[in-house]
Every structure is written in C-alpha cells, then in structure tokens.
C-alpha cells in the first residue's frame, strides 16, 4: 500500500532539546510539506520541498529545520529555539503538478515535558 | 462558517439526514479546492476536489458546490452515517504555486 508514514506518533521534548520527526512516503511524489496544527486553527505551513536537496520556508519556519536528501524522506527538526512547540505535526506529499491534492500522514503529537 | 478562533463551528445531524458544511475562501485567484475529513488523532483524508471551471462535482455520497461570485464552497453529504463524524475543512490553491491554504474546519457529529 502506498502512503505516508510519520513517526513517532507521540513525542516528548525536554527544555533545550532538539527533536526530529520522521516522514517517509512511497507514493513517488516530488513535493513534500510540513504543517503544524493547533486546536481551532487551520493548518499552517512550516516548510516545503519540491525537489530533492531543495526546500523553502513556509509561514512559520522559525525554530524549525528540514532536510531533503532523498525523494522519499523529509524529516523535520524542532529546535530549542521554538518556544511553543506543543502541537500536532502533519507531513504531506503531492505530485509536483497542478490540480493535485496533498496526501497526509497520521501526524506526530509533540508535547513538552 | 470558518475561522472563529479556538472553537470550531459544530454541526449535529441525525443519522440518515443530509449534511451541508460550508467554507468561505479568501482569495479570488484560487482555482482549485479540496475538502478533507479529519478524525480525531489522525491525518486529514482527501474527500473530493473541484477546479474553478466547475460549479459542482459529485462523488460517492458527497457533492461539492462552488460559488465563485461570493467565494463560497460547500460540501453536501447524503444519508449521513455515524462514521462521517469528524472535522471537515476546505483547502484552496492558486495554480501558480504549490501552497494550499486551509480553513479551520467544522466539527460534524452524527446522532444515531
């Protein structure tokens, strides 16, 4: 089955710690995205990548970093500079062409210890 | 309605009734729209999409209507079932870019 796998499902961060969220897709999609979801708010774009070794900041990139070394993988690091990291993080992918929906993983819930 | 802060709009319907969920989008240049369903603790699931050159599109038990004049999108679910209980939100996209903009969602509860 093709899809997007996010891990872990739950993650806890200590003060001053960086944590990395994994996102892997086997849909052969070129474009990948990271969103943050907070209660009662729409998804907000953190970073996106349209091709390997290239990525762009979204609306709320501060305190986050990404890499795109392989087409299948787009890990997100939540750094200690992100002062309010508690949220539900969603990874998505899509073909890099017009009028194509994004497909989502099942998310990682990050909490602060 | 959409974007009402910390509390999602809610809709409660009886099982078997039809549901209508609304979305007001913001950008008149948006030309591609998607409805997603999100169950608690899961990622959004694609339901149906529509391009701006259409006013209506039907799927299995779902219909999306697009009114470009007033920038309004609606999702109609026929014969609503308990498994339809979830948060539904719309997304808009301009064909020149890969970025989507998402509404805050409406929480649908189906009463058995």
Image: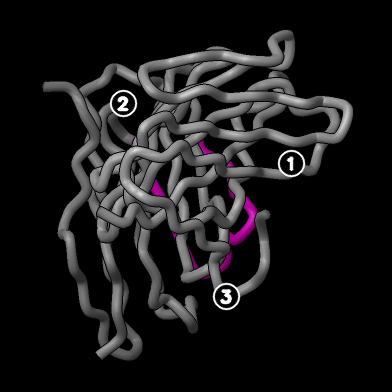
Q: Residue furthest right?
A: B69
Considering the numbered disc 3 on the image, is that residue within a helix, a strand or a loop?
A: loop
Disc 2 to disc 1, C-alpha distance: 32 Å
Disc 2 to disc 3, C-alpha distance: 36 Å
Closer to us: A5 or B28: B28
Q: Considering only vertical position in the picture, is A31 above or below B27?
A: above
Disc 3 to disc 1, C-alpha distance: 19 Å
Q: Residue furthest top?
A: B53
Residue A64, visible in the rendered structure:
yes
Which coloring applies here? one colour
Closer to us: A70 or B53: B53
**Boundaries of the magenta span:** A53-68
**Residue positioned 30% across, 85% down in the render:** A112
Find residue A71 and name its label: 2
Find residue B25 and name its label: 1
User: Disc 2 sits on a residue from what chain?
Assistant: A
Residue A109: give x, y in percent of width and height.
Answer: 28, 67
Residue A89: give x, y in percent of width and height.
Answer: 37, 59
- Number of numbered callouts drawn: 3
Tell me, yes or no, whether the two marked residues, 3 and 1, touch with CB atoms within 8 Å.
no
Closer to us: B61 or B48: B61
User: Of circles 2 and 1, which is in front?
Assistant: 1
Find residue B6 and name its label: 3
Of the 4 image quadrants, the one containing the N terminus of chain B is bottom right
**Residue positioned 48% across, 68% down in the render:** A38
């Amino acid at each position: 089955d093709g899809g997007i796998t996010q891990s872990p499902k739950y993650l806890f961060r200590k003060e001053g710690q960086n944590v990395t969220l994994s996102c892997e897709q086997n849909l052969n999609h070129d474009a990948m995205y990271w969103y943050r979801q907070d209660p009662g708010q729409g998804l907000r774009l953190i970073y996106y990548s349209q091709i390997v070794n290239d990525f762009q900041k979204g609306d709320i990139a501060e305190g986050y970093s990404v890499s795109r070394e392989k087409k299948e993988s787009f890990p997100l690091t939540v750094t200690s500079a992100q002062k309010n990291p508690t949220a539900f993080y969603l990874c998505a992918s899509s073909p890099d062409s017009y009028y194509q929906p994004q497909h989502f993983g099942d998310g990682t819930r990050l909490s602060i210890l | 309605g959409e974007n009402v802060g910390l509390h999602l709009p809610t809709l409660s319907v009886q099982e078997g009734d039809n549901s209508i969920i609304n979305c007001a989008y913001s950008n008149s240049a948006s030309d591609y729209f998607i409805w997603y369903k999100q169950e608690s603790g899961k990622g959004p699931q694609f339901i149906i999409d529509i391009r701006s050159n259409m006013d209506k599109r039907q799927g299995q038990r779902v219909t999306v209507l697009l009114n470009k004049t007033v920038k309004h999108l609606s999702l109609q679910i026929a014969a609503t079932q308990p498994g339809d209980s979830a948060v539904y939100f719309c997304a808009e996209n301009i064909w020149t870019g890969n970025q989507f903009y998402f509404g805050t969602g409406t929480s649908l509860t189906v009463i058995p």
